[in-house]
Image: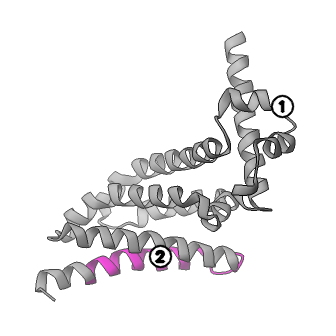
Amino acid sequence: MQKNSEDRRARRSRKMLKESLLDLMRKKPFSDISVRDVTDRADMNRGTFYLHYAGTVDLLKSLEADLLEELQALVDAHMQETIAEESVAPVLVPVLDFVVEHRETCVVLFANSEAAGFIQALQELMRRNGAPLLQEWFHPQDLRLADYFFSFLTWGFIGLLKEWFAQDMAMPRTELLSAAQHMAEGTAASLFSCERRGA
């Protein structure tokens, strides 16, 4: 019972520290944020911080890892449906819902150069999950071209989301989903059919 109580306190502490970091990152560059800034914002002592994290970089990486883990779990849950329907739509809907739910966090991470590792990890997540689908549906011959495709797709999706958020999500969600689906499937079909023709 005591261990469960300690685990709950630890989870609560980590959650508060991450929320404090995000709040601070909305106001000033990550490089200007100290451990004291984070603990003061969380109303927590520095000793508690160091029980969980080595520093602010470690805290940021943990926050990013949490998001990526949740995102991967969503993709895993909808991958079979995506394969069966031969469309990215089944996985795009829950992913977009997830991004909207974590809108404030995504806005902060997309806007901070210190979170470049998160963008790279997001690109790797898309490549890792998308490569088998790409191979199944389009049979690309040049794997380097596939890497460029996933890089293009990652930045395209991020740009799409940033613009949508900047416009306070004025575009209906169904239209945004349709645009994202056409971006992914249309680009792949055009790019890899040209490859087969030797264009």
Residue position marked by numbered label 2 in the rendering: 156
Would you say residue 169 is visible in this rendering?
A: no
Figure colour scheme = one colour
Which residue corresponds to the image point at 57% horizontal and 49% vertical from the top-left? 64
Residue 142 at x, y percent in the picture: 17, 71
Element under disc 2: helix
| Res 73 label | none
N-terminal label among 2 and 1: 1
Front label number (2 vs 1): 1
In this picture, is 101 found above or below 152? Answer: above
173 drawn magenta: yes
* C-alpha span from label 2 to label 1: 41 Å
Which residue corresponds to the image point at 76% horizontal and 52% vertical from the top-left? 33
Residue position marked by numbered label 1 in the rendering: 45
Which residue corresponds to the image point at 53% horizontal and 71% vertical from the top-left? 158
Q: Which residues are magenta?
A: 167-190
Picture quadrant of residue 18: top right
Q: Amino acid at mark 2?
A: Gly
141, 5: nearer the viewer: 141
* 44 to the left or right of 141: right
